[in-house]
C-alpha cells in the first residue's frame, strides 16, 4: 500500500499526508452521516457526555468523542474505519495486529473560536522521556481525514521522536498556543488524510469557525509489550462489549475490537 519512502518519511517526520484518499462518493456519504450524527448530539441532545466543549462551557463544541456509541452511531462512519485508504495505510505503518483506540469527529465551533494549546497527546506539557518516544514510533497511528478543506491542525515535523528543545519548552510554558519554531500548518483538501504519530507536538486552531468535519481516529499496534487488560484505557466504554455491535462490524474491523476487549 505504501512505498518504503512513504513509510520512512512517516517515521522520520512523524506524519504522512495522503492526497485525495477519500473518493467523492465516500466524502458525500460520510458528510451526510455526520450531519445526522450532529443532529442527534446538538438538537436531540443525546450523548452529551462525549462532546468536546470549547473552554469547557456547554454552549459550543469542537468535536464528538466515541462516535460509535449506540446512541449516535452511523453505519457509514463505522465502515469508514475499514476503508482501505485508512486501514491499509495503518497496516503498512504499524503492522496487521491492531487494536481500536479512539473514534472521534472534529467539527467547527459555531460561536466561539477554537484554539487549543500545543501538546503531545500523552503529555500536555510535552515532557516525554526519549526512551518512551522511541518506543512509540510504531506503537500507534492517529489520523485526521478531512471531509471539507481543513487547515486547523498545526504540527512540528520531526518532534515526535525527540525531547523538547529549550525554545519549544518556553513556548509551551509561557505562550502555549502561539507560534512554535518550525511549525507547519497541515493543509488538507476535502478527501486528504494526514496520518501522524500522536507524540508529535501539535495544536488545533480554527478561530474563524470555517466549516470542519474531520474524522479523527487512532489505532494502536499489538506488540510483545502489549499488556492484556491495560488499565490505562478508558473504562467508560462498556457499550463496546455489545454483542450486536460486535456481530455487525465489517469483517476487517472485528479483530480490532476483539483486541480492544482482550488488551483493555
Ligand atoms: O484540531 C485538531 O486537529 C487537533 C486535535 C487535537 O490536538 C487533539 O484532539 O488532541
Image (cartoon, helix red, strand yellow):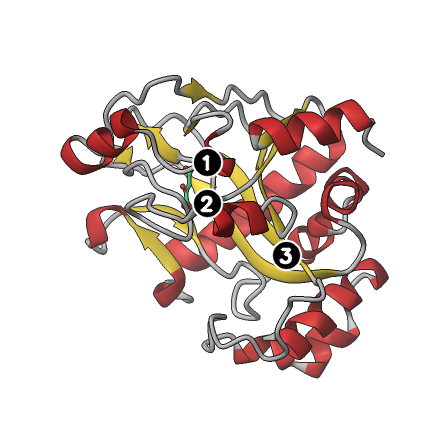
Look at mark 3 in the image and give the residue it sits on. 220
Q: Nearer the viewer, residue 228 or 80?
A: 228
**Is 70 located above or below residue 61 in the figure?**
below
Residue 162: give its label.
1
Q: Which residue is mark 2?
A: 130
- Asked if residue 192 shows in the view, the reply is no
Residues 71 and 178: in front is 178
Q: Is residue 37 visible?
A: yes
Badge 2 local density, few (<14 within 10 Å), some, or many (20+)?
some
Residue at the location (67% across, 34% down)? 27
- Cβ of mark 2 under 8 Å from ligand 1: the answer is no
In the image, taking residue 34 as reference, residue 124 lies left or right, namely: left
Quarter of the figure with residue 260: bottom right
Which badge, 1 or 2, comes first in the chain's sequence?
2
Q: Is residue 14 left or right of residue 10?
A: left
Label 1–label 2 contact, CB within 8 A: yes
Q: Mark 2, mark 3: which one is toward the viewer? A: 2
**Element marked by disc 2:** helix
Residue 195: percent from the left, percent from the top? 62, 36
The count of marks equals 3
Q: Residue at x 62, y 51 (%)?
A: 140
Q: Does the beta carbon of the residue at mark 3 sit less than 8 Å from ligand 1?
A: no
Q: Which sits in the foreground, 254 or 2?
A: 2
Amino acid at each position: 500500500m505504501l512505498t518504503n519512502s512513504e513509510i520512512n518519511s512517516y517515521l522520520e517526520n512523524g506524519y504522512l499526508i495522503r492526497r485525495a484518499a477519500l473518493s467523492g462518493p465516500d466524502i458525500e456519504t460520510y458528510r451526510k452521516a455526520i450531519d445526522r450524527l450532529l443532529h442527534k448530539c446538538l438538537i436531540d441532545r443525546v450523548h452529551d457526555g462525549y462532546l468536546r466543549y470549547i473552554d469547557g462551557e456547554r454552549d459550543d463544541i469542537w468535536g464528538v468523542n466515541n462516535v460509535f456509541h449506540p446512541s449516535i452511531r452511523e453505519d457509514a462512519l463505522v465502515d469508514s474505519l475499514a476503508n482501505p485508504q485508512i486501514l491499509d495505510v495503518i497496516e503498512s505503518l504499524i503492522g496487521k495486529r491492531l487494536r481500536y483506540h479512539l473514534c472521534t469527529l472534529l467539527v467547527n465551533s459555531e460561536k466561539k473560536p477554537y484554539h487549543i494549546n500545543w501538546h503531545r497527546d500523552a503529555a500536555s506539557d510535552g515532557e516525554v522521556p526519549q526512551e518512551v518516544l522511541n518506543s512509540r514510533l510504531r506503537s500507534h497511528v492517529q489520523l485526521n481525514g478531512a471531509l471539507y478543506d481543513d487547515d486547523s491542525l498545526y504540527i512540528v515535523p520531526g518532534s515526535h521522536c525527540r525531547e523538547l528543545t529549550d525554545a519549544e519548552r518556553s513556548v509551551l510554558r509561557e505562550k502555549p498556543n502561539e507560534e512554535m519554531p518550525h511549525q507547519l500548518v497541515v493543509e488538507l483538501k476535502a478527501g486528504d488524510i494526514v496520518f501522524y504519530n500522536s507524540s508529535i507536538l501539535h495544536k488545533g486552531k480554527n478561530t474563524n469557525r470555517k466549516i470542519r468535519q474531520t474524522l479523527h481516529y487512532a489505532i494502536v499496534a499489538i506488540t510483545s509489550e502489549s499488556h492484556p487488560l491495560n488499565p490505562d484505557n478508558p473504562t467508560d466504554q462498556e457499550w463496546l462489549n455489545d454483542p450486536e455491535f460486535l456481530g455487525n462490524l465489517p469483517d476487517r474491523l472485528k479483530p480490532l475490537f476483539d483486541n480492544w476487549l482482550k488488551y483493555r
